[in-house]
Amino acid sequence: MESAQGEPEDNNRSGTSATLRKWGPLGLLIAIVAVIIIVIATSSGGNDDTEDQPTVPDSSSSESTDSSSESTDSSSSSDDTDGIETTEKSGAPVEECPTVSDARDNLLSGVMFYSEAVTRCIVDDIEWGERCDEEIGRLKLPTPLPPECFAPFEGDNGGATAPGVTEDSINIVYWRWMENDFILKYITGPIANDDTNADAEASLRGMIEYYETYYETYGRSINLIFYEGTGLISDEVSARADAVKIAEEYDPFMVWNGPTLTNAFENELTSRGIACLSCGPAQQIDYYREVDPLSWAFGMSAAQGTMLASEYIGKQLAGRNAVYAGDVDYQTQPRVFGRLWIETGEASADQNIEFEEALAEYNVGIAESVAYALDPATLQETAASAIAKFKSAGVTTILLSGDPISPRDFTQEATAQGYYPEWVHISSVLADTNIFARTYDQEQWSNAFGITALAARVDPTVSGAPFLYKWFFGEAAPADDSLAVIDPWPATFYPIIQGIGPELTHQNWRYALNEADPTRRSVIGSSFSWGEKGRWPESMEYDFFGNDEITVFWWDSTKEGIDETDVVGEGMYQFADGGKRYLPGEIPEDDISLFDRTTSIDIYMEWPEGEQPAFYDPLPSGG
């Protein structure tokens, strides 16, 4: 995944072993998917259950990439490096290699990346190929920190290492909603998106061609099955039927995407041993433990989101006056909190209780809590009742967790009732995008701020999936409006499988993710990690969720700028402190500056310092 995150690493060949950041930062591209994927419902699961652990080569064994078994004859010796054929050029024998003792012993068989080859003093023994810039040991991609080069694999990859995997292919099903899904159209109505499913399929196949030109896949290519759903995104019956058909007819190794308002699709797939990568709404942690290692998510879990939200409110808002409210009387009063949240089932109600319990640990109480359903027929009536309750309870600050449509009705009703509180965005999907925020009552949303997992964007003409597609193919993607929604699946998949190696299994997927270090940090992309990284409390145990960071932002109703569909208009989210991001425990108690353009950024029209990428000509497909 070609994200822009932080300062480039030192790639001097005399350096020591690099970490498994080699996969390439995941942050920016995966953060993009958080802009669009509609994750509203959640449900619960069961107990922990894991498979046998993978076999990891010992760095001192004859099958390892360690050069300890190399001959001291430097004339024409060769080494079988886990199936990677190498020819010695100038590599030193082990006793002359000063860094070989630092070699990793946790690489899966067949895996060799550039900085590890440096550590083992075999970097010059490997033919890295045209895709690799050997001066820096990274792929020739026009991104701020391209992934490390991986040694091309030759040899026996094990063939059918898992269901849906053969010697030369990996079956992947990409689920896509029906083109006439009226629920989805209601939710995404404000987005001027005319991409068809045929456009989406063509663009996805194009991105797969791009990734397979640069990433190591150990002799296999994706056999993509593009599947259009047969029911609405909320229909459990059709979702389960789709899953059964996919399992029985296509035998995939993994499914990408799924119905966004029901867990039935994912539940059916994992019950049949098929892996899911963000196949539907996020579920409770017990579900992931029960189906481990078959289900993985891009975003945070509900518990993780609750932890960061309560930390933000407890440290930044509690005990202070409501200075950002539109009502001047509120601005001189200590904040009184109200809670507005979408209810989609028992799990969402339980999560709201957990959120209020987490707030209580910071001595924060909720004066009025209002749940609502996303129902066009009743939303206006619900909004009138909710606003009246908040106003009567003296709520100065509304904590909002919901969908992207309802804030339009709630803010319009607040203005109609002459009520001007602070609006604090906590976890509302898509309400943190400019394109939706422009549809809300601007007199109200001028007092909106909060936290988001999104990041400050960079000029889309030089960054992101649409830019990479055009760079690679010389023309815009057929699905130019929605490619950023589609790309996170292959953008996540390819870096992971090249870290797994030829023995592609679900358990090795889990192992490789656990061994990989978190992606580096930046103001323009989240740091992602899975597994046991120590970023979250031990009570959360193994982490099946990718994103670990949030940032603080506010709505600038008069700023003109480019929204997520490249439309220039008035109203932009501003990211505080230039987009500074926070992991759990990092949110400061000192005030973060809000509603100050001099310290905030809406979109970087030039790359931030240290992020400027090099430019390369694209390789021919398959290069």
Image: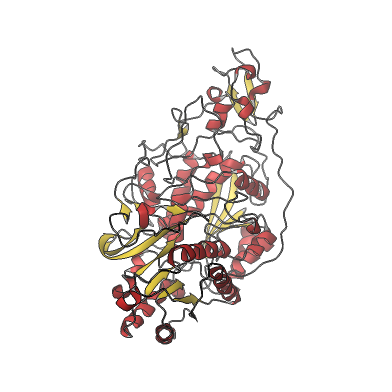
Residue 229: x and y in percent read 53, 67
Residue drawn at x 65%, y 66% is 268
Residue 210: x and y in percent read 45, 44
Does 149 appear above or below 405? Answer: above
Res 286 visible? yes
Q: How has the structure been colored for display?
A: secondary structure
Residue drawn at x 41%, y 45% is 4
Residue 249: x and y in percent read 63, 60
Residue drawn at x 48%, y 69% is 178
33 with respect to 442 (left or right): right
Residue drawn at x 67%, y 67% is 45
475 with respect to 307 (left or right): left
Task: Using the image as rendered, state which of residue 172 and residue 452 is in the foreground.
Answer: 452
Location of residue 36 by image quarter: bottom left
Task: Using the image as rendered, state which of residue 426 and residue 404 is in the foreground.
Answer: 426
Res 176 visible? no
Location of residue 357 by image quarter: bottom right
Does 235 appear above or below 477? Answer: below
Task: Using the image as rendered, state which of residue 98 and residue 354 is in the foreground.
Answer: 354
Q: Residue furthest right?
A: 52
Residue 34: x and y in percent read 46, 60
Number of numbered tags placed on the structure image: 0
Location of residue 345 by image quarter: bottom right
